[in-house]
Amino acid sequence: MRTRSLLLTGAHRLAILAYVVFALFPLFWLLKVSVTPNDLLYSEGVRMWPSRMTFEHFNFVIAHSAFPTFFKNSLIVAGATAVVVTILASLSGYALSRFSFRAKYWIVALMLITQMFPLVMLVAPIFKMLSPLGLTNSLTGLVIVYSAFNVPFATFLMQSFFDGIPKDLEEAAMIDGATQFVAFRQIILPLTLPGIAATLGFVFTAAWSELLFALMLISGNDAATFPVGLLTFVSKFSVDFGQMMAAGVLALIPACLFFLLIQRYLVQGLTAGAVKG
Amino acid sequence: MHQPIKKHRPPLKKRLADASEPYLYSAPALILIVAVMLVPLVVGISYAFRDIQLLNPFSGGFVGLDHFRALGQDEAFYGALRNTLWWTGASVFLQFTFGLILALLLDKPFYGRGLVQALVFLPWAVPSFLAGLNWAWLFNPVIGPLPHWFTALGLMDEPHNILSDPHLAMWGPIAANVWWGIPFFAITLLAALQAIPRDLYEAASIDGAGPVQRFMSITLPFLAPTIAITVLLRTVWISNFADLIVVMTNGGPADRTQIVASYIFTQAFKRLDFGYASAIALVLLALLLVYSMLIVLLRQTMLNKG
């Protein structure tokens, strides 16, 4: 019996190790290419680590390219989108969690259907709507579009967090004379901080990576986000993979940091709501 | 609202305020969704019946069902439809299977679980097109290790790029997609697993149920609703998800990896034919709606039984 459980534990750890390697190896390769000098890029293409390391790609990207602008734009867009969506989704998620009202099923259906749109279909109409308002080629326009795309899923996420909080809490407050909104703001919201963190992080990573609309709504370098900027490394005369991968590694940092911080809350919050399925 | 008037009815103003409260909470989100998604969708649907060519100033006329008639004869579209089934089916199945296994592995307490969880969920944070570029790189025999490993394992005669092999090319984007999408399933399923009351398992083992029996009669039934909803959402997302394919193979070689979503993309941005692109998108949307309704019905019957 002892040996059997020891074997099982060993198999468990091995499987975990396999998953970690599988998850990290492509990221390791990205890092490896970004520190490989150009002359070794192909000759040592399949080596695990180049015989010489260099940070010239990082240097070039930070000091001599428009990448810092892209990076700043992306931070602004993703940050603003995350904040806007989290506020809107807390409100609508609360409505779905606490009230039963006529339009509820229609709202849920509408939000589910928005998940099915082939977004390519919306590019031309959105462009035509935003252009007279002066919102194409502007970060504000991107924030508006990304907020709309992310609100439905964020609403479901926030709803599941609210579902995990007992109703008695705000009922008690309301007996003491608070309105429901005051109870929501002062009692329920502070309890859903993990949920808010999870939603912020989820939306931030989604907005950080979006390419299609960034590509279509923005022309010119001033308002470009980094996914668009990264493509400029491809569309030049030759693809400079080292620089591109260095830019990629830099671009990964904020999204990964954010994600590392929030992933635990994501599981927690979904656990709370999952009881109801 | 024709209820008989009762004695202790609150004043009209208060009732109105109560009734409108949920709408006030959801209004900002709804207004945004309607303005930025629903209105453009309706406009987009109207494009499907019009001749919209981006660079042709004389286009814009109403063409009725012409696009759909053309679509009915479009061999490339049927090919893309078959590829979509293959791409979506294989991606969802593999993501789900490996996601479930990962969730089960992470559900057991062990030293360093927090760190491991953070690391294995990391691919989810990688921008999809960067993931695509990176995997295209890994599959390239000159600069990536995978073909050499496949050769060493005897899966290949000599290192070559599967992305340029018509019979194998689809596996490239699928592999990238599985890598990228496992965390989504693992996160949601792990959350559902942790919500299962532990005493159920204890009671079952006291009654002599083995691990397989416990999994079949406790874990699976508890997970079923979550599985249904996540599989539904993922299927819809993945069949619309063209980023990896556009970046890695651009639909080639010989259209073997062209899915409907990337075909729409090609029609819209390479041929600038937004009318035809919208018609294809409308067909895809209709198919996804039918599929989702089937899943929702299935889930409803499952919930009613349980």
Image (cartoon, coloured by chain):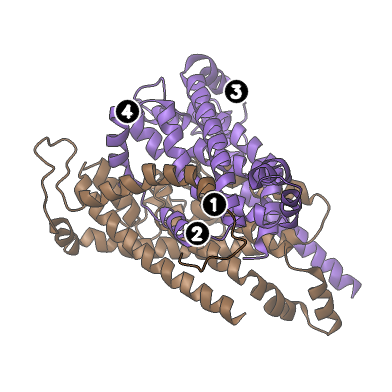
Chain colours: A purple, B brown
CA–CA distance between discs 1 and 4? 31 Å
> Which residue is at 68% across, 65% downward?
A275
CA–CA distance between discs 3 and 1? 58 Å
Sequence-first disc among 2 and 4: 2
> Which residue is at 61% across, 40% downward?
A201
> Which residue is at 47% across, 51% downward?
B159
Which image quadrant is residue B285 in? bottom left
Q: What residue is disc 2 on? A: A104
- Residue B118 seen from this side: no
Q: What residue is disc 4 on? A: A133
CA–CA distance between discs 3 and 2? 57 Å
Classed neighbour count for the residue bearing mark 1: other residues with Cα under 10 Å, few (<14), some (14–19), many (≥20): many
Which image quadrant is residue A79 in? top right
Q: Are the residues flagged by discs 2 and 4 from a single subunit?
A: yes
Q: Chain of mark 2?
A: A
For the residue marked with disc 1, what is the amino acid?
Pro
Q: What residue is disc 3 on? A: A54
For the residue marked with disc 3, what is the amino acid?
Thr
